[in-house]
Amino acid sequence: MNVNKIVILTGAGISAESGIKTFRDTGGLWEDHPVEQVATPEGYAADPALVQRFYNLRRAALKDVEPNPAHVALATLQREMQARGGEIMIVTQNVDDLHERGGAKNVVHMHGELKRVFCAACDHHMDCDYDIFVETTCPACKTTSTVRPDIVWFGEIPYHMDAIERAIKKCDLFVSIGTSGAVYPAAGFVQIAKHYGADTLELNLEVSQGSYHFDETRLGKAGSIVPDWVKEMVG
Ligand code: APR
């Protein structure tokens, strides 16, 4: 492996074979709900109980899914890179916990996490493995009706952008896995990586909106093509 610094961006496609629906494929997650209803601050203000229910169901559903070989392979790559003194950042747009359960560490969740909530009054962020309701009281400031899912909704600013951009600017290789390239800022990471001289690789089921930006695109299911690629990398 002659690559020393890698940034990996993952999207819903890496969790598809674990049984979590993607967003924009047929039968996608939003199908039963308009995006505006469950993934915007305005939707939450209009019907907080419905939005809490939506995320409670998705959080509970995590118990029924398992990481697939793509999550496990990325964790292997992370361990191998670090053992060889390399640097690797796994950035995910996913709010599930399958990278962690596959063995990856320090995963950067730019769109938040289903198993986190925060208080909109005092900004206290906390782990959450249970249902929350409009009536839930913040354990830190004791305010009621202010605890919400720690999910970055449309119109909100993704997390950890400074650290992500710093890592992309100095990486040798940027790899995008299972994302349609439809949502910025993540969709623009490949252009930053290329501008700063990195090689770029896309692993996706089909040609995406962003494919033409990548040096190479490999098509197939993440559960097969990610482990194959990791084998090439680590030997
Ligand atoms: N293996 C690899 N790729 C797959 C697989 C699979 N088994 N199944 C589907 N894909 C690909 C699809 O072809 C598609 O290009 O994964 C991509 C999923 O795209 P989206 O549904 O748009 O998901 P994502 O790119 O993660 O969405 C980005 O949009 O709604 C927001 O915040 C949400 O984080 C999400 C963001």
Image (spheres, helix red, strand yellow):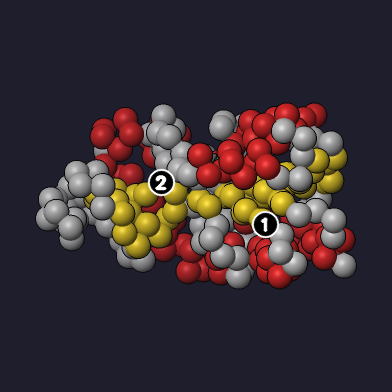
| Mark 1 secondary-structure assignment | strand
Q: Quadrant of residue 179?
A: top right
The amino acid type found where label 2 is placed reads Ile
Compute the Cα span from label 1 to label 2. Answer: 27 Å
Query: Does residue 144 appear left or right of residue 190 in this picture?
Result: left
Ligand 1 located in image quadrant: top right
Upstream in the sequence, badge 1 or badge 2?
1
Instruction: Please give the name of the residue rendered at 71% of the width and 70% of the height, measured from the top-left corner.
Output: 83
Instruction: Please give the name of the residue rendered at 51% of the width and 39% of the height, measured from the top-left corner.
Output: 162
**Pointer 2 residue:** 151
Up the image or down, 176 lies above or below 67; here it is above
Check mark 2 vs ligand 1: CB closer than 8 Å? yes or no: yes
| Mark 2 secondary-structure assignment | strand
The amino acid type found where label 1 is placed reads Glu
Provide residue 188's location: percent of width, then percent of height: 64, 31
Provide residue 71's location: percent of width, then percent of height: 66, 63
Query: Farthest residue in the front direction?
Result: 85
